Amino acid sequence: MENENDFNVETVTQYLSEKRFRELKEAGLHQAPQDLAEILTELEKEDRVLLLRLLPKEKAAETFVELDSDSQADIVEAYNDKELSDILSELYLDDTVDIIEEMPAVLVKRLLRASTPENRAGINRLLGYPKDSAGTIMTPEYVRLKPEMTVAEALAHVRKVAIDKETIYTCYVTADDRTLLGIVTAKALLIADLNARLSDIMLTDVISVNTEEDKEEVAQTLNRYGFLAIPVVDNENRLVGIVTVDDAVDVLSDEAEEDFAKMAAIMPTETPYLKTPTKKLFLARIPWLLILMVSATFSSMILGFFESALPAVLILFVPMLMDTGGNSGGQTSVTVIRGISLGEVEFGDILRVAFKEFRVGLCCGGVLGLVAFGKVLLVDRLLMANPAVTVTVALSVACSMLITVVVAKFIGGMLPICAKKLGFDPAVMASPFITTVVDVLSLLLYFVIASYVFGL
Amino acid sequence: MENENDFNVETVTQYLSEKRFRELKEAGLHQAPQDLAEILTELEKEDRVLLLRLLPKEKAAETFVELDSDSQADIVEAYNDKELSDILSELYLDDTVDIIEEMPAVLVKRLLRASTPENRAGINRLLGYPKDSAGTIMTPEYVRLKPEMTVAEALAHVRKVAIDKETIYTCYVTADDRTLLGIVTAKALLIADLNARLSDIMLTDVISVNTEEDKEEVAQTLNRYGFLAIPVVDNENRLVGIVTVDDAVDVLSDEAEEDFAKMAAIMPTETPYLKTPTKKLFLARIPWLLILMVSATFSSMILGFFESALPAVLILFVPMLMDTGGNSGGQTSVTVIRGISLGEVEFGDILRVAFKEFRVGLCCGGVLGLVAFGKVLLVDRLLMANPAVTVTVALSVACSMLITVVVAKFIGGMLPICAKKLGFDPAVMASPFITTVVDVLSLLLYFVIASYVFGL
C-alpha cells in the first residue's frame, strides 16, 4: 500500500481478493492493534481469519485481544490447536480470562486445551474469584523482587523477566511467603544508587486491595491515587496479583456507560450503538417501557376518580405539574445515583441527603410555585383569554407545584439510597422510574389541594 | 499517633490544638497526598495552613495539587513568597496551570511572581492554548532523546533528568528541531542491548495529537490505544508536550459527570454532591426547571383547545401517553448523546441513526400500542368498570401510542445530532428536553387521531 492511511476495510478486502498478501502483511505491521481490530470486525468471517493469519504471532495476539467476543469466537473456531497456542502464549493471563469469560463452552475447552499447563492453572484460579471482584480483573504477571536485593540485582532481574510482565513500572517487594512488604517504581530503580538495598529504598506505605473487593471500588482506588497499577492481596496480605491502570479505566468507563443506559430505562448492551442490531436495541428498550406504561394505570385511576368532581380547567395544568415534578425528582436521583456510584454517598448519609434535598426542594418549589402562579394568571388567563382560569385555580397550581417539587426531590434522593441498601441497583431509580412515581403523587396532591381550595 | 488509621479530622484537630506538631508531622509522612488533601479540606482555614506547613516541601506540594481550588486559594493567600516558590518548584507545569486557571486574578499574580522565570514562560505558553484543547492539559516536562544515542547513553540521560519529568516510562526521540521521530519505552530501554542505537530500536509508527485538538478527543485516543502518555505536536510535527494517562482519565470522568448532570437538566457543578452548598445546588437546578415548566404552556394550549370537543374519558390516558413517549424518546437521545460523546456517532451517521430508530420505534411502538389496547380494555374498562372506555377509545390510545413512540424515537435520535452540528451541547437534548417536546406532539397526535376516530 502506498500510504499507511489507505489501510481500511475496502483496500484490505481488495488486496485479500487479489491475494496481495505480502503487501498486506507489510502494511498491517504499521497499524496499531486497536485499528487492526476495528477493520477485522468489519470484514467477512473468512477474510478476518485470513488477515489475522498473515500477521506475525505477536501482532496477531495483540489484535486478537482487541476484538469483540463474536469475532474472537470466529477466530478460535477457525484456528487449529497449534495456531491457538501461538496466540495464547503471547497473551497476558487477565486478558485470556476476559476472553474465556465471554466464550461459548465448547470453545472454552479448546482454548484451555491450547494453553500451557501452567497457564491453565492460572486461568482456572482467576476464573474462581467471585463475579466482579478484583480477582477477576487482576493479572498474576507482575515483577516480584526480594528486599535483600541490591538495585543492580533488581535491574538485572527486571531485564530478565520484563518481556512476560504486564507492567514493570511498579515492582513488588515481597517476603518469601509472598507477603507484600513494599513497592519500588522503575523510576526509583533507575535513579537510585546501584548498590542500595531494596529494603532501604522501597516505599512501605503501600495501598493495596483485597481479591474479593468489588472491581469498581478497586478501579476508583487506583484512580484516586493516580497509580499505574495497584497490588491485590489475599486475607493474609500475600500478594496474588495486580490491577493495571488500563483495566481500571475500562471498568470505570463500562460502569459509567451502564449507568447512562440504566438511568434512561435501557437494559445495558455492550456493543457500540451503531453496531447494535435493531432487534437487540428493541429488546434492551422494551421491558422498562412496558413496565412504566402499565404503571401509568395509577395515574388514570386518579384522573378518573377526580375528573368529574372538579372544574375541567384544572386538567390544563396536569402536564406542567407532572413534568416539573418528574424533572425535579430526576435531577436529584441522578445526582444521588452518581454520588453512590462514585462512592461519595453512602447509606449513612441518608439524613444529610434528606435534609439537603428538603431545603433545595423548598427553594426550587418556592420559585417554581411563584412563577407558575404568575404564568397561569398572565399567560393562561389574560393572554389566552380563558375566564375559567381563576385566581383560585392559579393558587391550586402554585401550591401543588411547591409541594410536588419538595416531595419529588425528597423521593428522588431517598429511593436510590434505599435501593442500594436493599441490594438493588440504584441506577434504576432514575428519571423514568421517579417520573412514574411522581406522576401519581403530583396528581393526587393537585386534586386533593384543589378539592380543598374549591371547598369540595 | 499509635496507628496510621487514626489520622483523621478529629485527631488532627486535637493534635494541632495540643501543639503536638512533631507527632503530627511524623504521622502525616505516612499518608497519601490524596488522603491528606481530603482531611485538609475539612479543617478550619488556620489549621489547614498549619498542617500543610508541617509537611516537608515535597509532600506539601503533592498534597497541595490534590486540594480543591478554594482550599488552594486559602494556602496561596496565607503563604509568603518563599513558601510559595518552594511549593511551586515541586509541581509539574501542567498541574501549576490547572491550579492557576481556577485562581482569582490577584492570587495568580502572586503565583507567577513566585515561579522561576523559566517556569513562568512555560505557564504563560500553556495558558495561551485554546480552551479545552490538548495544549491546556499537556505537560512540557517529558524525556527527550536523540536518535543517535545508544541505549546506555539514553539510560544515563534518563537517570539524570528523571526527577523533573512527569513520566519517564515513554521517552520521545526527536530531531534537533524537535520533530518527533519515534518513541522508546523504559521497558524497551531496560531490555535492549546497551550498545544498540535508539534509531534502531525506537517505534516509528507513533500516534500523536495536535495541540489544538479537543482534550476529550485526546483522552479518548490515549484510552483507545491503552497508552501511559501520548505526544502532543504542533502543526509542523514538532513535539511540544505530552498528556499522561492520569490527566486523560480525569478528563474522561469529568466529561461523563458533566453529561450525567446535563442529561438530568442540571448545570454541571464541580464539587462532590455532599460538599455542594444548598444554594449552589439550587442555582444549578432551577434554570432548566423554569424553562421546561414554562414550555409546558404549549401542552396546556392543546389541552384547552381539544378538551371541550372530545369525550372527557380520553383525558385518563394522557399521562400514560406522555410518559411513554418521553421515556421512548429519552432512551434514544441518551444512547445517541453518549455515542456522540464517545466519538462513535457523527453527523455523517444521521441517516443510519434515523433509519435504525425508525425501525426500533416501529417495533417498540407496535408492542406498546398492542399492550396499551389490551390494557385499556381489560383494566380500565372491565376491571375498573368504566363503560365510557370503549373500543374506540382503546383504538385511539393504541394508534396514538404507536405513532408517538415512533416520532419520539425519531426526534430523540435527530435532536442531539443536529444540536452538535449547530454547535450546541448535545447532552442538553436528553430526557427532560425531549419529554417537553414529545408531550406537545403526543397530545396533538392523540387528539387529532381521536377527533378522526370519533368522526369529529
Image: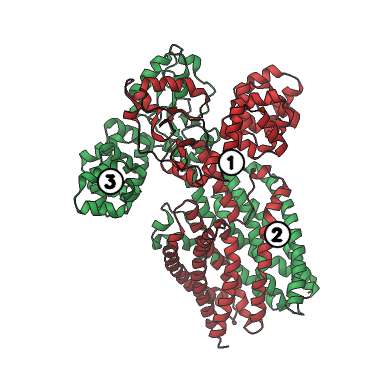
Chain colours: A green, B red
Parent chain of label 3: A
Residue that carries the numbered disc 3 in the rendered image: A107
Decide: few, some or many residues near mark 1? Use Cα within 10 Å; few <14, some 14-19, many ≥20.
few
Secondary structure state at the residue bearing disc 2: helix
The answer, for residue A227, to whether it is visible in the render is: yes
Question: Which element is circle 1 on?
Answer: loop
Give the label, 2 or 1, closer to the camera.
1
Left-right relation of B287 to A35: right
Report the number of numbered marks.
3
Eyeballing the image, is A82 above or below A353?
above
Q: On the image, numbered disc 1 is attached to which residue?
A: B128
Residue at mark 3 shares a chain with residue at mark 2 = yes
Spatial distance from mark 3 to mark 1, Cα to Cα? 55 Å
Precedes in sequence: disc 3 or disc 2: 3
Q: Chain of mark 2?
A: A
| B388 or A137, nearer to the observer | A137
Neighbourhood count class around disc 3 (C-alpha, 10 Å): few under 14, some 14–19, many 20 upward: some
